[in-house]
Image: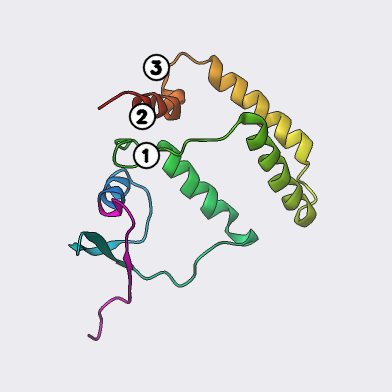
Amino acid sequence: MTGEPTRFVKRSRGREIEAYRALADAGVRLPRLLDANVVDGREVLALEHLPSIGYGAADVEEVLALLAALHRAEVDPRVVPLPAGMPQDEFEAGVLEALQRLATDHDVVRPRVWLDGYRRAREANHAFPGDHPDRGRSRVTSLADDPP
């Protein structure tokens, strides 16, 4: 087994094999899917082992790059379904809380200013026509609402 990669093996609760392949094909950087099978009706995935799980303050750029890649990925919403979402005011409260936590570590973070910037960007995004390329996520969301 010398030279073999260390693997992380897990049982899936859903259709992860198809989702991993679709996201990888869309260019999203994920742990490499090394092997996959269905055993007793449940998916079993062998993934590239990651040296750590989670992220810290030093990983902000990498996390933002991953989120951007997920946002840009054009995948069939039946394969990788979008989450249901939450009410806008609840979402913004969470954004503000996260910004306030960042502000304790970074003097340049001004939570209210950043939240106001987010709100202006959100309004500008909604002003784009529905088929505008900058509304890609909205286009995927509308596909998710259409029956197959």
| In contact (CB < 8 Å): disc 3 and disc 1 | no
**Bounds of the magenta segment:** 1-17
Residue on which disc 1 sits: 81
- Residue 32, percent across and down? 31, 61
Task: Classify 10 Å Cα crowding around label 2: few (below 14), some (14-19), many (20 and above).
Answer: some
Mark 1 lies on a secondary structure that is loop
Q: Vertically, is 104 above or below 34?
A: above
- Residue 6, percent across and down? 32, 77
Mark 2 lies on a secondary structure that is helix
What residue is shown at x 34% (from left), y 42% (from top)? 80
Looking at numbered disc 3 in the image, what kind of residue is underneath it?
Answer: Asp
Mark 3 lies on a secondary structure that is loop
Looking at numbered disc 2 in the image, what kind of residue is underneath it?
Answer: Ala
Residue on which disc 3 sits: 131
Quadrant (top left/top right/bottom left/bottom right) for the N terminus: bottom left
What residue is shown at x 26% (from left), y 54% (from top)? 17
Residue 69: which quarter of the image?
top left
| In contact (CB < 8 Å): disc 2 and disc 1 | yes
Residue on which disc 2 sits: 144
The answer to if 25 sits in the magenta stretch is no
Task: Classify 10 Å Cα crowding around label 3: few (below 14), some (14-19), many (20 and above).
Answer: few
Judged left or right of residue 118, residue 6 is left
What residue is shown at x 29% (from left), y 41% (from top)? 79
